[in-house]
Image (cartoon, grey):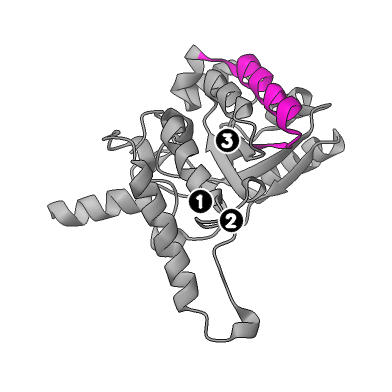
């Protein structure tokens, strides 16, 4: 589960139970590695586990010490041999932890879940923002880039009528212009019981054009996994609902 409480996300609806252990995180990777090995029938077209993305059900930087131990083992030549440049770590934006990650000396890729271009709106969407604020998050991300040389990605879940208007696009462009940054726009994946909507196509298109004209790299993430409840926290809720039925 997750304790960050982002209003659009299924991960936090049932609360946080605990962090994963190093062993549990490694088990996920080993199981995936074994699945790719098992599915390799043609040696000339061999598949293997090549990349790690740490995001989804929970806040990775809230479990940073264990995560760094996990990634160190995964990156070892006697482990899974997955180098730091093939690892992406997502965060809601915990400035002190972002700085700690930068101090690790590893060139992991950092993805910051921004979701809003001003503090008032971000605090509505991401309640923990009232303890941090966008300026502190951007400052920590700048420090991460300075120490690692790795471009920072800013994730932005697009909620129809809430954070997808022209003024929001202009504000976001203003925040990121001049920074080595990339924006992933993520049209909201419906969560049963939540009062949000996917953005209109014309609003999304206009948003992209405004940000791009400001010289900021931006893409709309392709929607995948909706048929299997793959968005953050959805599968957990489905399994728990079935277990209590």
The residue beneath circle 3 is 161
Residue with the mark numbered 2: 51
**What secondary structure do most residues of the magenta stretch adopt?**
helix
Q: Residue farthest to the left?
A: 245
Q: x and y percent of residue 155 in the render?
A: 61, 38
Tell me the quarter of the picture where residue 216 sits: top right
| Residue 74's disc number | 1
Local packing at callout 1 (Cα closer than 10 Å; few below 14, some 14-19, many 20+) is: many
Left/right of residue 109 with respect to residue 92 in the rendered view: right
Using the rendered image of the protein, determine whether residue 49 is visible from the camera's viewpoint. yes
Q: Label 1 vs label 2: CA separation?
A: 10 Å
118, above or below 159, in the image: above
C-alpha distance separating marks 3 and 2: 35 Å
Compared with 70, 123 (above or below) is above
Front label number (1 vs 2): 1
Which residue does the image show at 85% across and 33% down from the upper left? Answer: 214
Q: Position of residue 239 (x, y in %)?
A: 25, 55
> Dot 1 lies on which element?
helix
Q: Secondary structure at mark 2?
A: loop
């Amino acid at each position: 589960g997750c304790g960050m409480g982002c209003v659009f996300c299924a991960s936090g609806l049932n609360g946080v139970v605990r962090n994963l252990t190093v062993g549990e995180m490694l088990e996920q990777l080993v199981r995936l590695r074994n699945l790719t090995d098992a599915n390799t029938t043609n040696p000339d077209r061999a598949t293997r586990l090549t990349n790690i993305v740490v995001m989804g059900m929970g806040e990775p930087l809230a479990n940073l010490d264990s995560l760094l131990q996990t990634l160190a083992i995964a990156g070892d030549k006697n482990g899974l041999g997955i180098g730091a440049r093939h690892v992406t770590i997502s965060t809601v934006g915990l400035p002190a932890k972002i700085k700690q990650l930068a101090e690790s000396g590893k060139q992991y890729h950092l993805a910051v879940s921004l979701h809003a271009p001003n503090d008032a709106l971000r605090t509505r969407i991401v309640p923990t923002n009232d303890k941090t604020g966008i300026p502190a998050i951007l400052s920590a991300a700048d420090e991460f880039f300075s120490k690692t040389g790795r471009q920072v990605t800013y994730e932005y879940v697009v909620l129809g009528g809430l954070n997808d208007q022209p003024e929001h696009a202009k504000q976001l462009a203003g925040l990121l212009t001049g920074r080595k940054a990339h924006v992933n726009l993520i049209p909201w994946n419906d969560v049963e019981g939540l009062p949000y909507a996917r953005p209109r196509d014309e609003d999304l298109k206009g948003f992209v054009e405004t940000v791009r004209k400001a010289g900021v790299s931006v893409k709309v993430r392709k929607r995948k996994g909706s048929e299997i409840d793959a968005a953050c926290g959805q599968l957990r809720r489905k399994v728990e609902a079935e277990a209590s039925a």
